[in-house]
Image: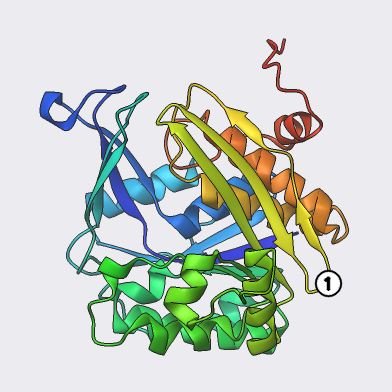
Amino acid sequence: MKKIVTFGQIMMRLSPPAFARFSQAHSFDITYAGGEANVAIATAQWNVEAVHVTRFPDNDIGKAAIMYLRKYGLDTSEIQLGGDRMGIYFVENGANARASQVIYDRLNDSFCTLDENSFDWERILTGADWFHFTGITPALSSSAAKACLEAVKTAQKLGVKISADVNYRKGLWNWGKTPQEVMPELVSYCNLIVCGNSNADDLFGIKPLPEDKNKWVSTSKQIMERYPSIQLILDTKRDSISASHNQLKGKAWNGEKYYKTITYDIHHIVDRIGSGDAFIAGFLYGYDYFDQSVQHALEFGTAAAALKHTVEGDFNLVTVDEVERLASGDTSGKLSR
């Protein structure tokens, strides 16, 4: 992978320090993040040219966000300025039996009110290997959905591979159309998607066939039959023992074979937000780097997701060597000098 372009909303993240509750907070730690940008920044750590397309308010908050993103190697040249405000989300980190919680204030921000005709997608996507979006982007507004559709159409025309985490968020779809009216057309252009059984049912009305033993493979087969451009479907299985202890493994279907990884036993979680984005970023990078080996890419992506749980904030700030070390079975966390 030489270049990836991502498209989606970025918000200001406000978190009480350490594991404090909202009711205890006298201050908030500020970072900036969004699902698609998380993917771009993860790959930027691995020497990939990563371009994120979004819109920020033309004020000091928007400019602060751009500077923050540049610090992690993201190409911010396609970020537009305009609109009234930046979306915000608040994160309270849980511990042990107390779950984390997130409160969103994201609607009607600069991204939601973008002009769908203001992006020169042919210029932006020229030379890209992948274009990535999530189901959150078209959920936010009619204009965001139209811009996303134009992006995938252009990417297909240019021969750019398209990936999507379908990521159904029921509470976001309030602008007039249902996800069932929008997502199928977007997905029809994709080469790779992240999709579980519940999302397949909610978005596409696809359920596992009763006679099939592996329910997820059953669903994946039907998705590929309906949308022939899709060549790979990914998902993760997470078991939450507590807020501080999860188990995670990855799985993939390429139309012929079912792939899976070992289960990572993740103790003492620092921050699990963004781990799904770390997974898809790792897979995309590994798929190109490992000469389209699904198994190797899946192992790299799942190891990247496991490591994300050790990093504060949404971004997966880990190296290729760190991911490969974990994927090879080294879970010692031995001091590196």
Q: Horizontal placement of 122 versus 332: left or right?
A: left
Marker count (numbered): 1
Quadrant assignment for the C terminus: top right
Quick one: which residue is furthest to the front in this view?
211
- Quarter holding the N terminus is bottom right
| Nearer to us in this view, 118 or 229 | 229
Residue position for label 1: 256
Name the residue located 69 percent from the left edge and 68 percent from the top edge.
Answer: 217
Residue toward you, 70 or 28? 28
**Which residue sits at x=22%, y=31%?**
28
Residue 317 visible to an observer of this rendering: no
Q: Position of residue 215 (x, y in %)?
A: 63, 66
Residue 318, given in percent of the width and then of the height, sits at 62, 34
Whether 216 is drawn above or below 222: the answer is: above
Image quadrant where residue 293 sits = bottom right
- Residue 185 visible somewhere in the drawing: yes
